[in-house]
Amino acid sequence: MEVAEPSSRLSEVITYGPRDPVPAASSNHETLVIEVLTNNYIVKKVYVDPGSSVDVMYYRTFESLKLTREQLTPVRTPLVGFGGHVVHTEGMVNLTMTIGRHPRCRTVPVSFAVVKADSPYNMLIGRPTLNALRAVYSTYHLSFKFPTPAGVAEVSSDVGAARECYLATIQAAVGPQPPPRSEEKRPAVLSIDCIDPHKAGEPSRLEPGDKVEQVVLDKAKPDQVVQVGAGLPSPLKEEMISLIKDHRDIFAWSADEVVGVPPELMIHQLNVNPQARPVRQKRRHFGPERSKAISDEVDKLLPAKMIHEVQYPTWLSNPVMVKKDTGGWRMCVDFTDLNKACHKDCYPLPRIDALVDSAMGYEVLCFLDAFKGYHQIGMNEEDQEKTAFYTDQGTYCYTTMPFGLKNAGATYQRLINRLFKNQIGCNVEAYVDDILVKSQATSAFLSDLREVFGILRDSRMKLNPKKCVFGVTSGKFLGYLVSRRGIEANPDKVKAIQDMSPPRNVLKKADQFAWTEECQAAFDQLKQYLHHLPTLASPRPEKKLYLYLSAADEAVSAVLIRDEGTQVPVYYVSRALGGPETRYTQVEKLVLGLVHAARRLKPYFLAHPISVRTDQPIRQILVRPEASGRLTKWAVELGEYDLSYERRTAIKAQALADFLAELTFTEGPESTSALAEVSTSSLWTLYVDGSSNRDGCGAGLLLEGPQGEVCSYALRFDFPATNNEAEYEALIAGLQLARKLGAQQIHVRSDSQLVVRQVLGEYEAKDETMQRYLSKVHQLTAYFESFEIQRIPRSQNKRADALSRLASTSFSDLNKTVLVEVLSEPGYVEEEACPVHSEDTWMTPFILFLSQGTLPEDRAEARRIQRKAARYALRNGELYKRSYLDPWLRCVTPEAGRHVLHEIHEGLCGAHVGHRMLAKKTMLHGYFWPSLRQDSQDLVLGCPSCQVHAPEHHQPSNFMVPITSPWPFEQWGTDIIGPFPKAVGGYTFLVTAVDYFTKWVEAEPLRTISGLAIQKFFWKCIVCRFGIPQIIISDNGRQFAENPFKTWCENLSIKQHFTSVGHPQANGQAENFNRTLLHGLKTRLHRVGSSWVEELPSVLWSYRTTPRSATQETPFSLTYGAEAVIPAEILTPSPRLAAYAAEVNDEKRQLDLDLVEERRDLASARITSYKNTLAHYYNARVRHRRFRPGDLVLRKNSVSRAEPQGKLCPKWEGPYRVVESDAKGYCKLSYRDGSLVPRSWHAENLRLYYA
């Protein structure tokens, strides 16, 4: 089956085919049971039921997720099962749920019906979630697939969990059975083992928000790198790198470098219940891939002495293999039974909200991650055997604290608190293994980092350099994006809102449901508002905070802000009302919102005085003796806080509170705000419209005053303008008119979607003209107390539209009773004022000293003037300087000097000379000023003609990145050669392919170049002979990059790698073979009557039987295990032919095949050595040319061919703007209008452009 997604961002085809694995359990008709991430917990045993019309969460799961009944929304409709039985729900809870493995995962909002019922499952996912994911379900494959921005994700069933849940269901239906004698009876559902906190190291936990760069710590070991912030000032960055290099011993690059913290500092003990019976789990068997991963992990941990072999263990567990985001496997151990027997360690973990508050507002941040952090803490010797686990090599136990033990997190937190007891809260924040180093100022950054490094060195704790980032200004900490500005919206958490599809049906019956353009526009606007959330700030110590309250029919909300001239939000709180709470009076709802805020934000209420800003008499009601019982109870509860009440003045923060209250969706009537509407007694309404056609351009506007007065206005432009520019002109003219008439509150209505959304910030103004128009509009809107702009249909803007069309038509015969103003220039052009400056210049001190003997008051400056004045002289009031090239040079100001340089460089007698010759020529003509050399250099660098005609650079710009293949026929390079002279059969082109490992080559002549011909070549010559390759490297030709070849590769799961334009070195193996092939063909074509097609097999045979320099083996021997017999051995028998014996030939051939693996391993080592030698030679000639996003560059015209070719034509063309760049030198470019340039470009074909 095949499903095509309609969305452009999620448009990949979803298929199930014969290549998709079919689990053995599918023959037993098992159910689909998965695990998901929700509310920062990993929930296992989640049943996927496409037949269910509702998503269900069982109440014990609801409690395990730390959810409260206050989060439930009442629901009156019960659930009806397949057999007709009725289940009443506790309510609905709205959560976000992540399904899949990063990066192929999706986060969607889910509304769960919470029920109290017995079930072996924790949740049930039905059609609503599957439809939200756009999932395709297959019971045969026991999985479902769904599109993600990173590609199609597949979630497979946990067969073991599905079988366990099935048996538990059968056991519950049949009745209790006696447990087997061999093991103790175990419960079917272990909620504490099936709902785990979101572990550290996941992508959403801790990562930098700035751009980073890698720094090599040891040149002798180039793979030992750390990540540092790219935006850090250079002096500070150099000092930081020096500090890191001085402490390189605190980093570990392999497990054997981890020595562990001293036992006297921390050791992990298992507090096992003495009455618990030891459990030996039944051994589970794994497939070859997972078994190999377990063996590899044991081989890494055993030399590092993190595990050791154990015999006759009483506790024995199974390993569990978890797929990493990188595609590898992570080995964990299922300590379910051992954890049940251990008492919980009640060591308190830090509050996440307090840590996040403490982490924001700092200039420099460092994110640290320990190398196998848990394994750096030793296990108590008596408890080591209890951690034993199965492997194919035997049973092993941990000598260090493993991941998965019940109290491992508490032990690790205890160690971190003990190490950084004096730093936590000052310059360090830590939550288990997430460590953040923060510095209030850059001046203290190095000392803070040095202090932390010293503690780590003393404690022998090692860091993982791959996951540490130093010297950034923002990053993700505990799921929040923190920076010096505050807490910002995490893009990963609001991505579900951006991907939300518009509604397609209604919950209740309706006469008609139609989704119009206005609905879509409002829906998109709402998503934009939710996507660009305001930044949250941390409160100042002991400073007063302000609370705004709001109450609607179905919800109450509060906004806690910090007011220091400008209002900055600190926290948002909202709560849905249920049952009798919806019938509270308006004032009681506001008091309930205050009480709820005090409960949720208790740390803030205890640490700060709170001022409640409201227009309701809350304080008077709470102190009344005749108040109701609940008001009295609330007054007593609020009495412990330092609360004060003041009248509300600002509307901005109140609007945020109203928005939270009104955003609660329930089954009741629409919520209405308790606040009175803003008075519209002084509101002006402006209708604007612009028009542009072949007769001219114009604009019309209609301004309606609060008293009913109407001003009609038409504008005609004497300059060309597009329709969007005419719309902006109308808006600018209308705002200027409203300002002159004294309007303070204005509501603009326009039918231009582009203008309205750019003003609202929903669209980005990429064009320079649009940016200037938008800047002018923002400048004008600042003069009004309130400004609002709204898009309306053209049918509601007929009067302004008529005026714009009237002004844009040819009006030579127009009756002038309609006043039309004519504009001669765009509205964004400001009136330029040219002030006259009479400031002192660099010549003034010399003139004053030579004419009047006056010196500056500063002694050092006075001595400098006296020393230099000997080379200056005054003639007729002008200052001259003595020169070595010419007797006297006239001194001029830098402004006048730049005019002189411009004329000499590119004037009538200019020839665009270099900057040194330009400075010399300027002095030969008798001019001087102090910055002559620098001004000459700046002028030449920024000269467009000099840049486009600059010589091409031939030195490489980046280090060589050798391309290697791990095994034969896994990676092929391909190319097309031609055109050749037409041969017999009409062949004019040649397609070639070379294997990167064995150097085996294939070639076939072609009549025409097409994707179908390339596909047939690869199928016949590559796939059918050597199997399906993993990677094909080619250039950007359409026959490779487009269908049908592209689709054919995708169907066979073949990855395509493309070289950048004009950079064939990226496919050097194919280019090298092409040269050899052409040379062989040319040398063999001297024979009369021969054709290049006829000579092709001979050249290929010669190449395949010739040893290659990289492998020192022939491609034939690496492919077939023995050398081929060539014609020369027939004419003069070689030793192996002379000693040929038919009776032992088969045995020798089998021996060659047995030894071919060793031959290939030796060839792989030689390839690596050979390419390292080439890279060393190549890298010695490298002259780095790095480009950053935003740089302007020129392209080599000989490669791009955008300009004509010839002796007098430019060598470079452009400019273009760099959009993306990487360390390998590949850049993505864009045109001036912002559209992307096709394909990537290498730095060797680019040159920096100076504007």
Image (tube, rainbow, N blue to C red):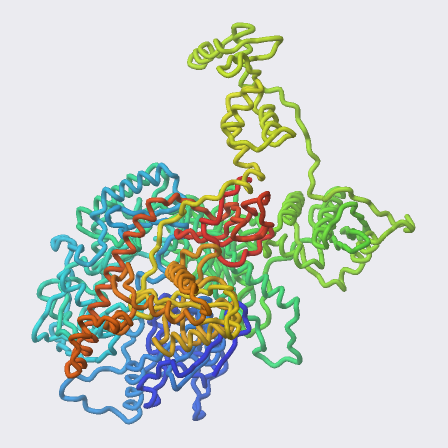
Residue at 46% across, 65% down: 976
- Name above or below for residue 119 compared with residue 296: below
Q: Is residue 363 left or right of residue 1123?
A: right
Q: In the rendered image, which quarter contains the C terminus?
A: top right
Please state which of residues 163 and 958 is positioned toward the viewer in this rendering: 958
Q: Residue furthest top?
A: 852
Tell me where residue 160 appears, x and y as whole percent: 28, 81
Q: Is residue 1057 left or right of residue 301?
A: right
Residue at 31% across, 67% down: 324
Please state which of residues 1096 and 251 is positioned toward the viewer in this rendering: 1096
Residue at 62% across, 19% down: 838
Residue 576: in sight, yes or no?
A: no
Tell me where residue 625 appears, x and y as whole percent: 48, 57
Tell me where residue 502 appears, x and y as whole percent: 57, 71
- Name above or below for residue 54 compared with residue 844: below
- Name above or below for residue 89 compared with residue 981: below
Please state which of residues 754 and 1241 is positioned toward the viewer in this rendering: 1241
Residue 1224: in sight, yes or no?
A: yes
Please state which of residues 118 and 261 is positioned toward the viewer in this rendering: 261
Tell me where residue 41 appears, x and y as whole percent: 34, 68
